[in-house]
């Protein structure tokens, strides 16, 4: 285990003021303090992805977001499902963070994915699209059973996730994320030590 807190970047897939996704992210972020400190990214300020804007002349908000991704030990993505897939706002953020291809700040980044939905299915289809998208960025999606929260509207109370079983299940997945981060840090240390 790391001696200083894990630095996590939280990304909510919803811009809605009272988004269930954001409420889940905030509840879990509080639950893992002091073991981990979470900064929540503002993906709503990112422009639509446009390759003409990418590269050396990228807008400041894009540079800031990519720096946040780079500096984080791991990412926690909490998203709903739109039309059986990833909400466009979230896919847009992934596309920005994914460049340059195979060398982006997402490469090797430990990632925990959590989805939710008002439906029984808990956004599981969006979860699988997210796993596909992150596979293309060579990030390391945490090996843990999928965290999907169905009937989410019944589990958010006063802007917080209030379902004990869902919280506990998600926190087990956080432990898997921390293990992944530790594994990576040890591997880097071993590599540096070998040279
Ligand atoms: C455009 C749109 C498409 C949606 N499509 C789906 C869907 O395919 N599957 C699903 O389970 N829920 C769907 N929903 C319902 C969302 O899961 C629900 O609104 C969710 O709680 C929104 O997440 P948020 O509170 O984080 O914004 C859709 C909602 C919207 C607005």
Image (cartoon, rainbow, N blue to C red):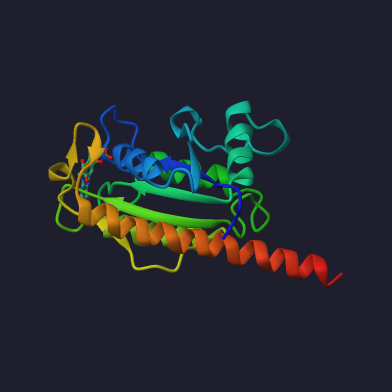
User: Residue sitting at 56 percent across and 60 percent down?
Assistant: 1
Vertical position of residue 79 compared to residue 135: above or below:
above
Q: Quadrant of residue 22?
A: top left
Viewer can see residue 51: no
Name the spot of residue 116 as percent of width and height, x first: 26, 50
User: Residue sitting at 24 percent across and 33 percent down?
Assistant: 159
User: Residue sitting at 29 percent across and 60 percent down?
Assistant: 169
Name the spot of residue 79 as percent of width and height, x first: 34, 47
Quadrant assignment for ligand 1: top left
Location of the C terminus (image quadrant): bottom right
Q: Is residue 33 left or right of residue 185?
A: left
Of 141 and 159, the residue lying toward us: 159
Name the spot of residue 101 as percent of width and height, x first: 64, 54
Q: Residue furthest right?
A: 195
Viewer can see residue 79: yes
Of 134 and 38, the residue lying toward us: 38
């Amino acid at each position: 285990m790391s001696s200083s807190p894990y630095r996590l970047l939280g990304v909510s897939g919803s811009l809605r003021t009272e988004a269930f996704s954001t409420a889940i992210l905030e509840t879990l972020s509080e639950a893992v303090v002091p073991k981990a400190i979470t900064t929540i990214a503002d993906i709503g300020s990112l422009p639509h992805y446009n390759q003409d804007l990418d590269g050396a002349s990228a807008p400041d908000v894009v540079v800031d977001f990519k720096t946040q991704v780079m500096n984080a030990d791991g990412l926690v993505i909490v998203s709903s499902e739109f039309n059986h897939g990833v909400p466009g706002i979230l896919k847009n953020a992934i596309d920005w963070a994914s460049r340059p291809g195979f060398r982006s700040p997402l490469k090797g980044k430990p990632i925990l994915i959590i989805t939710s939905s008002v439906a029984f299915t808990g956004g599981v289809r969006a979860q699988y699209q997210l796993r596909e998208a992150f596979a293309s960025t060579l990030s390391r999606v945490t090996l843990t059973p999928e965290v999907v929260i169905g009937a989410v509207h019944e589990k958010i109370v006063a802007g917080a996730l209030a379902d004990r079983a869902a919280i506990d299940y998600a926190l087990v997945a956080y432990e898997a994320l921390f293990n992944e981060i530790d594994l990576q840090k040890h591997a880097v240390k071993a590599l540096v030590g070998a040279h």
